[in-house]
């Protein structure tokens, strides 16, 4: 039946390009859009067009912002401009911001180094970060995913800042709250043990 509808096939093909949309949910999402009435469809399309027209990346920290407004992070007088938390993407920034416990600046790299996927230093905002650090930064916090790519990215940036008078830290690693030792993998337990702190 689907093979007989080129319009539906074209729509499904576009949906398949959406990251994190699992194949099993493809038809559910397609059904949602097919069931939308005309006013709701027009509203969705209008909001999406406005999003593309009015949202852009901050040229300083590289997070999303309104094109005609200052970046809410970079322009805030309540934030510590000498502390920069480096994240892989905007979603990580949002996760940190939701804690309500960080009041410094951010820098969004746009991903992590991954030669296998063809992502090198020039594909990320590492050069821009090094320039920012040179203009006055006391502490750089690496808030990367604990993956080989995250570790490689942290090591690469550290090498670019070698000899600079700057404190480089990373998020604490180890056991999550509510976990049991026997359920944890060996590396997590090792990190928790080797990076223990005073009680």
Image (cartoon, rainbow, N blue to C red):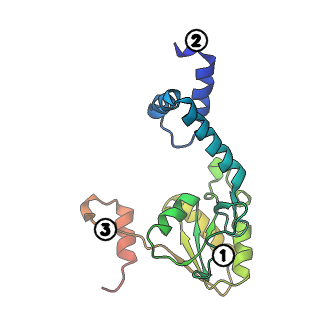
Residue that numbered label 2 is attached to: 4
Among the 4 quarters of the image, the one containing residue 82: bottom right
Residue that numbered label 1 is attached to: 75
Residue 114, labelled with which disc? Answer: none
Residue 86 placement, left or right of 53: left
Q: Residue at x 59, y 22 (%)?
A: 9
Instruction: Bin the neighbour count of mark 3 within 10 Å (Cα to Cα): few under 14, some 14-19, many 20 and up.
Output: few
Residue 116 placement, left or right of 189: right
Dot 2: what SS?
helix
Label 1 to label 3: alpha-carbon separation: 34 Å
Q: Position of residue 125 (x, y in %)?
A: 70, 64
Label 2 to label 1: alpha-carbon separation: 54 Å
Dot 3: what SS?
loop
Q: Residue at x 34, y 86 (%)?
A: 198
Q: Position of residue 96 (x, y in %)?
A: 49, 68
Above-or-below relation of 117 to 80: above
Label 2 to label 3: alpha-carbon separation: 52 Å
Residue that numbered label 3 is attached to: 177
């Amino acid at each position: 039946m689907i093979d007989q509808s080129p319009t539906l096939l074209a729509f499904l093909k576009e949906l398949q390009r959406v990251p994190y949309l699992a194949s099993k949910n493809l038809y559910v999402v397609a059904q949602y859009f097919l069931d939308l009435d005309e006013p709701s469809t027009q509203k969705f399309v209008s909001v999406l067009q406005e999003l593309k027209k009015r949202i852009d990346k901050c040229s300083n920290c590289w997070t999303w912002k309104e094109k005609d407004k200052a970046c809410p992070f970079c322009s805030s007088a309540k934030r510590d401009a000498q502390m920069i938390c480096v994240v892989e993407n905007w979603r990580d920034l949002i996760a940190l911001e939701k804690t309500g416990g960080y009041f410094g600046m951010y820098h969004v790299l746009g991903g992590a180094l991954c030669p296998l996927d063809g992502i090198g230093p020039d594909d990320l905002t590492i050069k821009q970060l090094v320039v920012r650090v040179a203009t006055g930064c006391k502490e750089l916090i690496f808030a990367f995913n604990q993956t080989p790519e995250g570790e490689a990215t942290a090591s690469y940036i550290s090498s670019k800042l070698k000899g600079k008078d700057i404190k480089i830290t990373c998020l604490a690693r180890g056991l999550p709250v509510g976990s049991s030792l026997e359920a944890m993998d060996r590396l997590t337990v090792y990190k928790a043990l080797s990076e223990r702190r005073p009680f």
